[in-house]
Image (cartoon, rainbow, N blue to C red):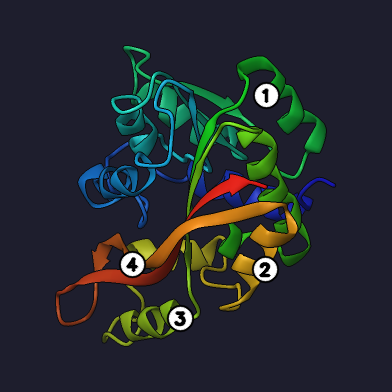
Amino acid sequence: MDVSQRYSEAWEGFWAATSDAPGEAIWDADPSLSAGPHSELLLPYADAALPVVDLGCGNGTQTRYLATRFARAIGVDLSHAAIGHARRADPEGVAEFAQLDLTDGDAVRALHERIGDANVYMRAVIHQSEAEARPAVAAAVATLLGARGRAFVAELTPASKDVLRQAGQGPDGPPKKLRRVYDHGLKPADASEEEVPELLRAAGLTTLDSGHTVLPQTEQLPDGTRIDLPARWFVLAVG
């Protein structure tokens, strides 16, 4: 299956309207708060000599960091505009970037055939995917891992909705970066608590380690504290 035209256009519109400034997207946190600590959880299980594929890479902030920890880093995103941002932010070619619809099984398999078994980094992709597309996203992780790769997957939990509601209770409503997410028809924290682990199991993935965390954002609550969205993380292998 492919994602719906509405969903594809929502992401294309979001990234087309986003500047190249770091942190302009609400989830574009510094890698010291994201891919850095996440790599420390993944690397005890992963072969860093294998490539790492950053699924839903956006403007490539985390991908460029992952290139310092793995032999090769490839960022993929549904949005052509996002890939444009990522390439402009990486003039030295530290990482590689390509447009990819994770629900296109043939395209995912072609990537695996091209690069071989790979590690996967996926931060907050399933929860905002269309419900009918989520099994295919989980399956894409398994396809890219093959026998030797390991994955780090972090997804927002429903508790994030409470934080987002709190963020919108300021006198002016949601802060600017969060409002842009809603204005483009994107739906954060849309998966249930048990849906994500069930999807991962159904895709043939085994959990090697897991825990609870938060995904820091680049906006603040009305009281000035940073928006930290509750999430669960999983280190995964096929089988």
Q: Which mark is residue 198?
A: 2
Q: Which kind of residue does numbered mark 2 sit on?
A: Glu
| Mark pair 4, 3: CA separation | 15 Å
| Mark pair 2, 1: CA separation | 25 Å
Relative height, residue 205 to residue 182 (above, below)? above
Crowd around label 2: few <14 · some 14–19 · many ≥20 (10 Å): few
Crowd around label 1: few <14 · some 14–19 · many ≥20 (10 Å): some
Q: Contact, CB < 8 Å: mark 3 with mark 2?
A: no
Q: Contact, CB < 8 Å: mark 3 with mark 1?
A: no
Residue ranking furthest to the top: 92
Q: Which mark is residue 161?
A: 3
Q: Which kind of residue does numbered mark 4 sit on?
A: Thr
Residue under numbered circle 4: 213
Relative height, residue 90 to residue 161 (above, below)? above
Q: Is residue 129 left or right of residue 61?
A: right
Taking the image as drawn, is residue 30 in sight? yes
User: Can you tell which of label 3 and label 2 is closer to the viewer?
Assistant: 2
